[in-house]
């Protein structure tokens, strides 16, 4: 079990993570609102999933993007989540 939880990261994985997070941050910061930022996050993560065979890298990038979105648009994110729940 521990083997599945902890994985050694290679230099290539570190480089990918840095590149993906940097790209996500730049595009998310340019979004006009939380909904657009979430759409950007989803598009980027889909693309990263296709490029990278490490789910760990994709998940880490998504978590970083979620952190940025929540930090910048916390009230919009809560409102957007609530609107989605009502549908």
Image: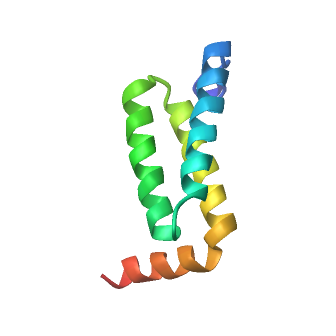
- From the image, which quarter does the N terminus lie in? top right
Which image quarter: residue 47? top left
| x then y, percent, for residue 51 | 41, 25
Is 16 positioned to the left or the right of 48 in the image?
Answer: right
Q: 57 or 8, which lies in front?
A: 57
| x then y, percent, for residue 35 | 45, 69
Q: 10 or 7, which lies in front?
A: 10
Residue at point 60% right, 30% down? 19
Residue at point 69% right, 65% down? 71
Q: Is 12 located above or below residue 2 in the figure?
A: above
Total numbered circles: 0
The residue sitting at the top extreme is 11
Which image quarter: residue 22? top right
Q: 52 or 26, which lies in front?
A: 26
Q: Is residue 6 visible?
A: yes
- From the image, which quarter does the C terminus lie in? bottom left
Q: Is residue 63 visible?
A: no
Q: Is 6 located above or below residue 78 in the figure?
A: above
Which image quarter: residue 36? bottom left
């Amino acid at each position: 079990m521990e083997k599945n939880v902890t994985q050694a990261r290679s230099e290539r994985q570190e480089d990918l993570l840095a590149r993906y997070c940097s790209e996500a941050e730049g595009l998310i910061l340019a979004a006009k609102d939380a909904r657009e930022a979430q759409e950007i996050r989803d598009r980027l993560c889909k693309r990263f999933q296709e490029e990278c065979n490490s789910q760990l890298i994709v998940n880490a990038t998504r978590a970083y993007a979620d952190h940025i979105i929540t930090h910048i648009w916390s009230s919009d994110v809560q409102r957007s989540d609530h609107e989605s729940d009502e549908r």
